[in-house]
Image (tube, rainbow, N blue to C red):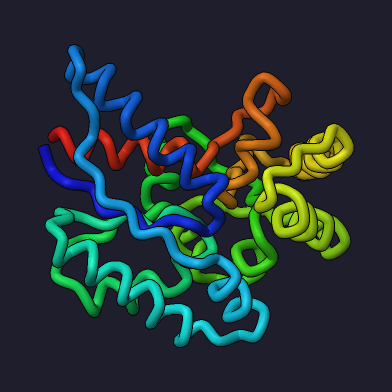
Amino acid sequence: MKTIGLIGGMSWESTVTYYQVINQMVGKSLGGLHSAKTLLYSVDFQEIEHCQSNGEWDKSALILIDAAKRLALAGADFIVICTNTMHKVADQIQAAIDIPILHIADVTAQQLIKGNIQTVALLGTKYTMEQDFYKSKLTNKGLKVLIPDEQDRIIINQIIYDELCHGIIKPSAKQAYLDIIDKLVKQGAQGVILGCTEIGLLIQQTDCLTPLFDTALLHAEEAALLAIS
């Protein structure tokens, strides 16, 4: 079994999901008392968020490069960055280490194509929705990506940082997200990417008729399968 190196803490609320899903998948696949070999480096998210809000992406990359190097030195066979937004600096991290990064957008695109989705809505932080580092991974594979309008992007981002990252789950927030999803479906979205690893804490497939692609679940499941392949 390969050892998974997790860079977590962004936020720790969703990192819990990664640890749980990875171990559940390994246990289900191998049976018995099997669990995953994992190493976790959990960063101080306040430092990362400060870099995000101030546009100091190179500084945030250095923090995550340090984490990745420590995981590699400790014996990780590959790296999983437990967040969508910080894949903005994934190429910089990859260039600094000798073990591969399992990219969350690549995993998501693979599942969208498998599900015959051609037009997909993307929900996430304002950085993920508005910048190209994530969307380009999807459009380069022939997918059409829809994002919410500006006011809805503000609502989505505010709920992520002010509520979900603190473990606060409100019915009003769920309804706000479902209303936004409904607008995007009316614009032609055949599926919806929950492109922030915290969003799955708020809405699940049972809340929505439109196919949801929870990136935290997909990423964690693929990491487990890679570890035992």
Using residue 9 as the reference point, say whether residue 223 is left or right of it.
left
The residue depicted at 38 percent of the width and 72 percent of the height is: 64
Above or below for 90 versus 228: below
Image location (x, y in percent) of residue 59: 47, 86
Image location (x, y in percent) of residue 132: 55, 71
Q: Is residue 98 visible?
A: yes
The quadrant the N terminus occupies is top left
Above or below for 152 versus 169: below
Residue situated furthest top in the rendering: 32
Question: Observer-nearest residue: 180 or 10?
Answer: 10
Using residue 44 as the reference point, say whether residue 35 is left or right of it.
left
Quadrant in the picture for residue 111: top left
The quadrant the C terminus occupies is top left
The residue depicted at 27 percent of the width and 36 percent of the height is: 224
Quadrant in the picture for residue 101: bottom left
Q: How many marks?
A: 0
Using residue 10 as the reference point, say whether residue 38 is left or right of it.
left
